[in-house]
Image (cartoon, rainbow, N blue to C red):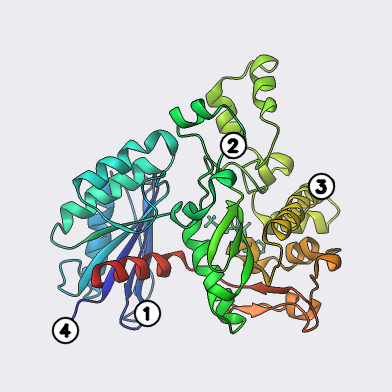
């Protein structure tokens, strides 16, 4: 019997999301989440999919990531899926920033871990938690490969002239300032799945992927290779997001510092956590924005319009970048569920070859599907993303190669 299970860990600063998958049939054995780590009100939610049992919830303090992972291990053991099992082939870790060094999934050793740690200045909100998750999992199962799968990796194929910012080259080099891009695991998975939906090989199709979750990013993928993406040095650039501003004149920052008297940290927090939909109308959840806009709420309506306007601009820009577009695909929480966003983003783009089948767009489904009429030159699709499956697949492929 070959080991075919992969545990996928997505460690945030105060949370750990996990999934245990069996790569023999790509099935999910268990999924869960530990949140509010380090607080009195920590919560673990565990769904034992393999046993078909009820979802279990644990409330009460979980002090740190080590305690969190031990609690997860105990839940899995209770399902007969303990992490000490010889069937566990690898642990796959989502790592947000891989810098220019990591362009593919990588088995983690001391040197790799040190390198991921050295990238903390580029991703201060994310990489520290990723490092902690790796340390804890390594201590638990030092005998099996721990694999890092980087959010930036898929975008490493961007040409230098696309990745560079038009600033002093020496300063850029000294401080590693360039565009890296994020959500790469999702863009990779969704662009491939879209090719499959069109009945083509990834090499044959050009796709614009719109990953619209709480964070949001667009990418232009030519023949399976990423040529441009909307996020940059950090996940702040590009589309309007739940709480992030996306694109803005960098001088806004100087203005807020000089005239508004705000500190760098205050502006950082403003643009990352209190902007986007939340900043414009007080709600970051698209469901609420749509509901309020539907009731005539002006701020919500305007926030929706700004969100959609930015999306349209990126569809246009990436059409120009790609030259020929075979499909525009919507994914993640908003992209998969919010028909009005898709409707508004595509409206008026007939000249670019885009059109919608309004009935298909309004239908709810968890399956990859086309929502454009047959005559449309550019297909419009909805393809649910599955970052955990993609991380597990990449990790498994690496350790069984
Ligand atoms: P994350 O970036 O946290 O992984 P998701 O991809 O899960 O985010 O997307 C979360 C967002 O999806 C929510 O903030 C919400 O705005 C949006 N969303 C989820 N369901 C719907 C829906 N039915 N209609 C509109 N928006 C939705």
Horizontal and vertical percent for residue 383? 59, 72
Near mark 1 (Cα within 10 A), the count class, few <14, some 14-19 or many ≥20, is: some
Cβ–Cβ under 8 Å for marks 4 and 3 = no
Say whether residue 159 is left or right of residue 139: right
Identify residue for label 2: 165
Identify residue for label 3: 302
Cβ–Cβ under 8 Å for marks 1 and 2 = no
Say whether residue 287 is left or right of residue 331: right
Near mark 4 (Cα within 10 A), the count class, few <14, some 14-19 or many ≥20, is: few
- Residue occupying the point 85% across, 68% down: 350
- Quarter of the image that includes the N terminus: bottom left
Say whether residue 90 is left or right of residue 323: left
C-alpha span from label 1 to label 4? 17 Å
Answer with mark 3 or mark 2, whichever residue precedes in sequence: 2
Identify residue for label 4: 1
- Residue occupying the point 22% across, 63% down: 74
Identify residue for label 1: 27
- Residue occupying the point 80% across, 76% down: 358
C-alpha span from label 2 to label 4? 51 Å
Near mark 2 (Cα within 10 A), the count class, few <14, some 14-19 or many ≥20, is: some
- Using the rendered view, name the quadrant where residue 339 is placed: bottom right
SS category of the residue bearing label 3: helix
In the displayed structure, 36 sits above or below 339; it is above
Task: Judge depth for marks 4 and 3 and give the one in front.
Answer: 4
Task: Judge depth for marks 1 and 2 and give the one in front.
Answer: 2
C-alpha span from label 3 to label 2? 30 Å
- The front one of 306 and 326 is 326
């Amino acid at each position: 019997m070959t080991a075919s299970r992969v545990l996928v860990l997505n460690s945030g600063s105060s949370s750990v999301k996990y999934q245990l998958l069996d790569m023999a049939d790509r099935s999910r054995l268990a999924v869960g989440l530990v949140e509010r780590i380090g607080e009195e009100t920590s919560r673990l939610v565990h769904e034992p999919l393999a046993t078909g049992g009820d979802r279990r919830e644990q409330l009460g303090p979980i002090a740190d990531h080590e305690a969190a992972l031990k609690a997860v291990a105990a839940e899995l053991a209770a399902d007969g899926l303990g992490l000490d099992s010889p069937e566990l082939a690898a642990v796959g870790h989502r790592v947000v920033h891989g810098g220019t060094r990591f362009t593919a999934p990588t088995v983690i050793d001391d040197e790799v871990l040190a390198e991921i740690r050295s990238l903390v200045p580029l991703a201060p909100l994310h990489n520290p938690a990723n490092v902690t998750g790796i340390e804890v999992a390594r201590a638990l199962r030092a005998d099996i490969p721990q694999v890092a799968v980087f959010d930036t990796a898929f975008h490493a194929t961007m040409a230098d002239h696309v990745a560079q910012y038009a600033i002093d080259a020496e300063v850029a080099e000294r401080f590693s300032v360039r565009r890296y891009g994020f959500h790469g695991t999702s863009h990779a998975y969704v662009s491939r799945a879209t090719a499959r939906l069109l009945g083509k090989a990834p090499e044959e199709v050009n796709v614009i992927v719109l990953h619209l979750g709480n964070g949001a990013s667009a990418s232009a993928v030519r023949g399976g290779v990423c040529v441009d993406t909307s996020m940059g040095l950090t996940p702040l650039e590009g589309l309007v997001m739940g709480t992030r501003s996306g694109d803005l004149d960098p001088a806004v920052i100087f203005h807020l510092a000089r005239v508004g008297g705000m500190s760098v940290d205050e502006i950082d927090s403003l643009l990352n956590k209190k902007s986007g939909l939340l900043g414009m109308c007080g709600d970051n959840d698209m469901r609420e924005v749509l509901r309020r806009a539907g009731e005539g709420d002006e701020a919500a309506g305007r926030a929706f319009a700004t969100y959609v306007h930015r999306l349209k601009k990126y569809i246009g820009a990436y059409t120009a970048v790609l030259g020929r577009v075979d499909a525009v695909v919507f994914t993640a929480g908003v992209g998969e569920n919010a028909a009005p966003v898709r409707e508004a983003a595509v409206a008026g783009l007939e000249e670019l070859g885009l059109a919608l089948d309004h009935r298909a767009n309004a239908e709810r489904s968890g399956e990859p599907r086309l929502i454009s009429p047959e005559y449309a030159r550019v297909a419009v699709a909805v393809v649910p993303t599955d970052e955990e499956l993609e991380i597990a697949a990449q990790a498994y492929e690496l350790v069984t190669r």
